[in-house]
Amino acid sequence: MSEINNGQKNEITKEVKIMFGQCGYNGKLHLEQVMQYCADLVTDLYTQNGQSRAFLNTHGYVQMVSRSSIHINRFPCENEKIIITVREEKPEGFQMMRYYNFSDENGEKLIEGKSLWVIVEPVTREVISPDKFEFCIKSDSQTPFERKPGKIRFSSDLLQYLGEQKILLSHLDPNGHLTNSRYINFALDFLPEKYQEKTITDFKLNFCKEIKKGESMYIFGIFDDEAQKIIVAGKYQNNVKSESSFECELIYK
């Protein structure tokens, strides 16, 4: 870890072994687990600085991811040991920026990405600026990354209805809503089979609005075979003009 001026650490590194239960049908690390590692190591970084999730909650703060962008050079496989680094970066406006790097034991970069997070009040979900977040880990780091997290642009008129997903108890996280790693599952599970067999090289996720137990998410998609790109949107109602819970862009080869 690197140390910054106020004694806090702005980076955490962890070696892990990919287990059977973390892999998909192809024996490779599931994208859900990539997202879960990113979120868990951010939480662990703050915990090591003395600000656990429970500590922050009692002080009126919850961290919620708003946008993510991930590039995959190669998926790690079952039983492979990898090194994951998560680093706090310079905030962008009202959002905290985090950088992620997954490498193998030889230093080969497997997965790289960035995500934007917001700090909110636990009950009202009012957004709190990083400069008002008293436990903010200060950092001026700005790691170059070509596909920064940002708004996913598409025409709603092109969306095709793919199916409905009911939000169940097992989908929830300790914040009481759909855990962020589950969204990539919904994006993949509702694809036609020929697209499920594609190798994903890049994906972006925009988390638009919380969805909770008992609610339904209606999944829509756009398939651009020429650009090898898929857009998936999860809506609150069964029509393309309704409000989005999440939007996802998948690039495949």
Image (cartoon, helix red, strand yellow):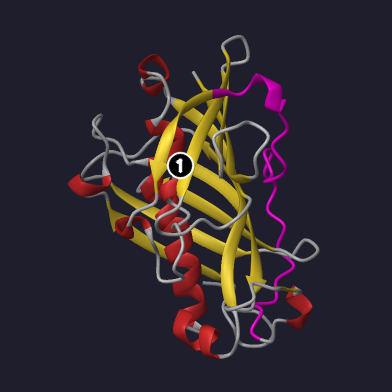
Relative vertical location of residue 208 with respect to residue 3 in this rendering, above or below: above
Magenta residues, start to end: 135-160
Relative vertical location of residue 229 with respect to residue 22 in this rendering, above or below: above
- Residue 154 within the magenta-colored segment of the rendering: yes
Report whether residue 50 is seen.
no
Q: What residue is drawn where x is 41% and y is 29%? A: 190
Task: State the SS at label 1.
Answer: helix
User: Is residue 17 rendered to the left or right of residue 181?
Assistant: left
Q: What residue is drawn where x is 34% and y is 40%? A: 76
Q: What residue is drawn where x is 56% and y is 11%? A: 225
Nearest to the observer: residue 243 or residue 88: 243
- Amino acid tagged 1: Ile
Question: Which residue is at the far top?
Answer: 226
x, y percent for residue 171? 36, 55
Question: Which residue is at the far right?
Answer: 93
User: Is residue 248 rendered to the left or right of residue 34?
Assistant: right
x, y percent for residue 84? 43, 56
Report whether residue 200 is seen.
yes
- Residue 168 within the magenta-colored segment of the rendering: no
Nearest to the observer: residue 43 or residue 176: 176
Q: How many marks?
A: 1
Nearest to the observer: residue 185 or residue 113: 185
Q: What residue is drawn where x is 78% and y is 79%? A: 131
Residue holding disc 1 = 184
x, y percent for residue 31? 40, 42
Q: Main secondary structure of the magenta part?
A: loop
Q: Choose top left, top right, bottom left or bottom right for residue 235.
A: top right
- Disc 1 crowd, CA 10 A, few/some/many (<14, 14-19, 20+): many
